[in-house]
Image: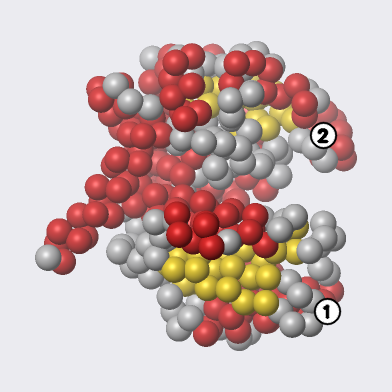
Amino acid sequence: MEDLLAAWDGESVSIHRDRATGIWMFICVHSTRLGSAAGGTRMKHYPRPADALADGMRLSEAMSLKFASVQFPHGGGKAVIALPTPQIPLGEARRRLLREYGAFINSLRGLYSCAPDMNTSAIDMDVVAEVTPYVFCKTEAAGGSGDTAPDTAVGVFHGIRATCRYAFGSDDLSRRTVLVQGAGGVGGRLIELLMEADAAVIATDVDAPRLESLQAKGIQTVAPDAALTTECDVLSPCAIGAVINERSIPGLRCRAIAGAANNQLATPADADRLRERGIVYAPDFVINAGGVLHGGGIEEQHWTREILDIKLEGIGEAVYEILQRAEGDGISTDAAARRIALARINSTETSAA
């Protein structure tokens, strides 16, 4: 872990070990230049604590870029609850663990505020909020903004339209085939939005009952291991990260990639590989920013539904700007998106000086 910490350009890592279970918790704060850090809580099994730390660091950096990309006043943070086995805690054991996590957050005195992420939910945030006020996206019944997935899907939908406008000269999705990889909270709602727009949808999911449910609705499906090699206009990764990598890129049969998953690229070099193949890539930390606009916009900025809808539509404009900038500068879309976001982050230093 020392090597990870030495190489990281973030601001701080806070570490806590739950004595009752031996579970490690990491809160990674990448930047507070735009405001206090905020980000999701990932509960997941990792082979080693160092793997959990590496994941938290990378995800927190993506959160910094995400907030800056949509000009929202927070810095990037991420929390990882590193489970020692694949079994997800339930019942009273889960409740006790979440309260322990809440006390950990509270000890940082507002440096970081949490939200749901992989294997955590708005209901879990209600439990965390019993011991700390630094929580976004509690259930609506508890005074929060609730599930972020539907609005994340709306932002991705606008991003797909913008990507098609750039790649094909039209944002008319009725002329496009979109393959959605992962039909959970975000992917499932995205499928509905695409079908309402008369797109030809192909879907896949590793969960067999979910796949059967899609088939029962008349949606074309493919096996999970065939998703990346199935011909389509737009590939929309909405599940795990790092699916776009040196091994998978040669087999891609799409013209564009625009999806909700975090950290879709295994390495920054993969963006250059996509550019070499002529595949348009909508940077994930921009197109999937609908969740932070939902939580922060409703709870902190007190946006009306009308304002939130305008902000979500703006994700499409942000994606289109990035695609044009990348073309003009002769660089990958990931590099262009990072330039724009980092310029906004670094401008706060200039202003402060």
Q: Secondary structure at mark 1?
A: helix
Label 2 sits on residue: 211
**Front-most of residues 20 and 318:** 20
The percent position of residue 295, horizontal first and vertical second, equals 49, 62
Q: Position of residue 248 (x, y in %)?
A: 64, 23
Q: Amino acid at mark 1?
A: Glu
Q: Residue at x 44, y 79 (%)?
A: 110
Q: Quadrant of the N terminus?
A: bottom right
Height in image: 65 above or below 214?
A: below
Q: Quote the CA–CA distance across marks 2 and 1.
A: 31 Å
Q: Is residue 4 above or below residue 339?
A: below
Does 78 sit left or right of 352 as displayed?
right
Relative to 207, 73 lies left or right: left
| Residue to which mark 1 is pinned | 92
Residue drawn at x 82%, y 60% is: 85
Quarter occupied by residue 345: bottom left
Callout 2 amino acid: Leu
Which one is nearer the viewer's eye here, 133 or 98? Answer: 98
Extreme left residue here? 353
Could you classify mark 2 by the number of other residues whose Cα lies within 10 Å: few (under 14), some (14-19), or many (20 or more)?
A: many
